[in-house]
Every structure is written in C-alpha cells, then in structure tokens.
Amino acid sequence: MKYFNRQLSSAINRAVSTFPALAVVGPRQSGKTTLLKKMFAGKAQFVSMEKPDNRLWVKEDPKGFLNNFQYPLIIDEFQYVPELMPYIKEIIDNNRQAGMFYLTGSQQFSVMKNLSESLAGRAAVMTLLPFSSSEAKEDIFKSWEDWFFHLTENKVIQSGRKTGPAIIQGFYPEIISNPEVDRDIWFSSYVQTYLERDLQGLYDIGNLDTFYQFLTLAAARCGSILNYSSFASDLGVSIPTVKKWFSILEASFIIFKLQPYSRNIGKRIIKSPKYYFIDTGLAAYLAGINNPDYLVRGNTAGQFFENFVISEFYKNKKHFNSNLNIYYINYRNLWEIDLLIEKNMELIPVEVKLSATIGPVHLKNFDKLRALVKTSGSNYLVCNSPEIITRRNTLITSWLNL
C-alpha cells in the first residue's frame, strides 16, 4: 500500500526536539501509527495497547512493563492504560530528555484527561485526522499561510477529480491509498468496530440500535446548526442523552463543532454551534448515500459540499498545528457566512457555494457582514468552478485547489 507524506510531520519534528513526550490523537484509521512508525523507523520500539495481554501486563505490573522497553518508545492507543501515565511521568522527571515517549490515542477526552493529570508540561499534543485534500494529491506545504495562498493560485485548474466522487469517497488513508478497497465494506467494518470496540468499551451509550439511528440522523443533517431538542424529539430520547451522544462523537473524532462568532455582536446572532463530520465519506455512508450524482444534485447536496469544504479548513488547521480560530456567523436566520477565520486579529470571511456559476446573489452576505464587524477587506468564495476569478473584492476559487 502506497505511503503518503503527512502535513503534520514538520510539527512533530519540532515537538520531539524539545518535549520528552509526544501524543498524536485522532480517529481510528487516520494514520497515527503508520506516521510514527515511518518517522521513527529504526529509532523507536513499538507496543500496542489494543492487545489484551499487553493491557493485562500493564495493570498487573506497570513498572515491569516499562522496564521491558528502551526509549524512545511508541505506545499505541494509550487511552486503554491510564494507569501507565504516572510511571511515564516518573521516568521523564528522573531523566528528562527530548523524544522519550510517542503516544497515540483515539479518544480525545480520555486522552486529554490523562495527559493533563500526569504529563502536563511534558507532552506535546498533536491531532492527525484523515487525509486533507492536498495530502491526497501529495501536495505538502510549509505553513498554513502557504496552503491558504495556494487557493488563490492557478487561473484554470486542470483536474480529473469530480465533486460527487470526492465527497462520497472521503479521505481515510486506506481508502485513498488502496484503490482495491470497497468503500461500502470498509465503512461498514469501520462503524461496526467503532460501535463495538470503542463505544461499548469506553462509554455507556444505552440502546445500540437507537444510537445507530442517531448516527444516521446526525449524518443526514451534517452542516446544520445544532438543535438538541429536534434530535431528542425525532429519536424519542432525552435532551441530556442527545448532548451526551454528540459529546461522544466529538470525543472520538467523528464530528467537530464550529462555534458562532459573537464578539461585540451581542444578541443579534445565532449562538448555537454548527457541526460537521470530519470525513464526508463516513457521513455519506451513514446517511445511506452511495450515488455520487446525488451528492451534487440531491436535496442535501449543498450541505454535504459545505461539510466537505469546511472540514478541509479544519483538517489543515489541525495538521499545521495552527493557533488560528475558525467560526461561522448567522444573523437572526436572515443571512450567514459559512466560515470566519480569525488570524492575527483579522477576520477573513469565506463562503461556500456548490454552484459553478457565481453571481451577485452569492456575494451579498459579504457586504452585510462588513456592516456588522470589521473584516480583513478580502473575501473568499469556494465553489464548484474550475476557474479562479476576482469579483467585487471577492476571490472566487475552486474546491479543487483545497
């Protein structure tokens, strides 16, 4: 299977030169183990905590377990052995060196709890998500700024990629790197493993069938403003249960939330977050969509395209380990800007439109935003056109450049 370079590698190299420990977190099958094994081949030993005998060994004799290995040591899926963290801390404090432990984890909240309690100040934490669109094209950039500038390059884009197939395929490494993989079988196995191994093992999710119904409903509504009451009513469960389930999806890197921008705006904007699936292939599978044409012509086409574009910005923020902030803004349900990037005290607005033909109606919300808050002065619109043009101070670019 072909190996693809990952954008996160440069941030990892910087971190391991100073921090005693590194934790790479992200969803299952996002390439965390493959990346660390590739980067530190011949330098680090490897042990997986997915093996029951290793977990039992740690529980019975954590010191003896660690004494069996040399450093640097890669510990895979370390959320299963929280009792190991105090002993790692002791080893680091007794002989502090850079690059002693490389940890991977697939459960965000439990991982961060263990790190904050035991390895605060000792571990750098990075997030590795499924491939970004640029990684899948084998385009690696030096910085987030270089990647963002790339959106403005190339007046005409030559590409055989089609919108529907790209969205429905998604960007999990095994699907991208192995053309023989059957998408439906892969996602079916992924969901089954996720439900049985992760959720039932780590969380009390209640009725599994109802939770699966929740998954499919969440996928069908991806890119929408989060309404817990609506989900609770449709599923026949309580609002606290829905909130818990969304927290579980976020903790296991299935979704991410985009918070509303509200600084100095007060009560004039919608204050609930929007939510997106990190991978559109998984969202389409859960929603029962297996026809690429439907993803560009069906009732949900716009929201899936928006999910696709916004998730690319989110993945690149994480993979560049950038401290920029991203938001959306909805003004009293009258108009919306899909993405606001806050960087260096500037707000950069980005709109997402599935259409390949952009007219004045698609640009009007930029003027409304400017009347509400101060922005950078440059607007961006990502659409389905292969051309890159500038119109009314708005750079209109193609999703193919992401």
Image: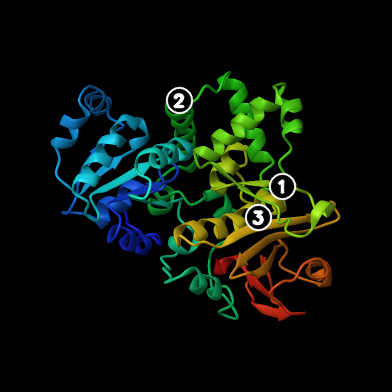
In the picture as drawn, the residue positioned furthest to the front comes out as 94
Q: Quick one: SS at disc 2?
A: helix
**What amino acid type should be assigned to the residue bearing mark 2?**
Glu
The residue that disc 3 covers is: 305
In the picture as drawn, the residue positioned furthest to the top comes out as 207
Q: Residues within 10 Å of mark 2 (few under 14, many from 20)?
A: few
Q: Earlier in the sequence, mark 1 or mark 2?
A: 2
The residue that disc 1 covers is: 300
**What amino acid type should be assigned to the residue bearing mark 3?**
Phe
Nearer-the-camera pick, 273 or 215: 273
Q: Which mark is residue 196?
A: 2
> Which x, y percent locates residue 104?
35, 43
Q: CA distance from mark 3 to mark 2?
A: 30 Å
Q: Does residue 125 appear to the left or right of 204 in the view shown?
A: left
**What amino acid type should be assigned to the residue bearing mark 1?**
Thr
The answer to whether 371 is drawn above or below residue 82 in the figure is below
Contact between labelled residues 2 and 1, with CB atoms less than 8 Å apart: no
> Which x, y percent locates residue 227?
74, 37
> Which x, y percent locates residue 274?
68, 47
Q: CA distance from mark 1 to mark 3?
A: 9 Å
The residue that appears at 74% across and 79% down in the rendered structure is: 393
Q: Quick one: SS at disc 1?
A: loop
Q: Quadrant of residue 268?
A: bottom right
